[in-house]
Image: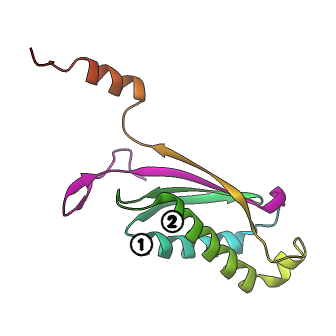
Amino acid sequence: MADQAEFSKLYHCVYALHYHLVLVTKYRRKCITAPMLDRFREIATTRCEGWGGKLMEVNGEPDHVHLLISLPPNLDLSRFVNNLKTTTSRLIRKEFAAEVSRVYRKPVFWSRTYCVISCGGAPLSVIKQYIEQQAAPE
């Protein structure tokens, strides 16, 4: 991953929007295996590209995954997350049915909740200071 943000373009804007997304398994059950995480990475990459974004990094532990994603500004972030969770849950439950059925009786995988944090660029204190130092009109 590069330390410097790369700008993307749409016909009306230039942007660099990065999000740290955390998805947690239902009841924080430790059911994610290495093959599941690899498959999750493939699905998430496809979903991000399908929504005009890019999956920059993904990793996780048996009960949650972290993603670093870049998405365009015209995207409804909550709809994207819902689509990502729905798609990955459905495909992982289908492709890893034996492993998932040992942990869950009902067709679930992700918790309803998620954490999304905007990231990248300068710290807020630096941006605030920069704005404060602008030459105001007289």
Q: Secondary structure at mark 2?
A: helix
- 2 vs 58, left or right, is left
* Residue 21 lies in the magenta stretch: yes
x, y (%) of residue 133? 23, 17
Specify the farthest residue to the front: 138
x, y (%) of residue 12? 19, 59
Question: Mark 2: which amino acid?
Answer: Phe
CB under 8 Å between discs 1 and 2: no
Query: Residue 91 lies in what quarter of the image?
Result: bottom right
Specify the farthest residue to the left: 138
Query: Residue 123 lies in what quarter of the image?
Result: top left
x, y (%) of residue 48? 46, 69
Tell me the residue that label 2 is attached to: 80
x, y (%) of residue 121? 37, 39
Q: Which residues are magenta?
A: 1-29
Q: Residue at x 29, y 52 (%)?
A: 15
Specify the farthest residue to the top: 138
Q: Residues within 10 Å of mark 1 (few under 14, many from 20)?
A: few
Q: Residue at x 57, y 53 (%)?
A: 21
Question: Mark 1: which amino acid?
Answer: Glu
* Residue 80 lies in the magenta stretch: no
Front of the two marks 1 and 2:
2
Q: Nearest the camera: 69 or 128? A: 128
Which of the labelled discs sits on residue 15, or is there none? Answer: none
13 versus 102 height, above or below = above
The tally of labels here is: 2
11 versus 47 height, above or below = above
Q: Secondary structure at mark 1?
A: helix
Q: Residue at x 87, y 78 (%)?
A: 101
Tell me the residue that label 1 is attached to: 49
Q: Residues within 10 Å of mark 2 (few under 14, many from 20)?
A: some
Q: Nearest the camera: 11 or 119? A: 11
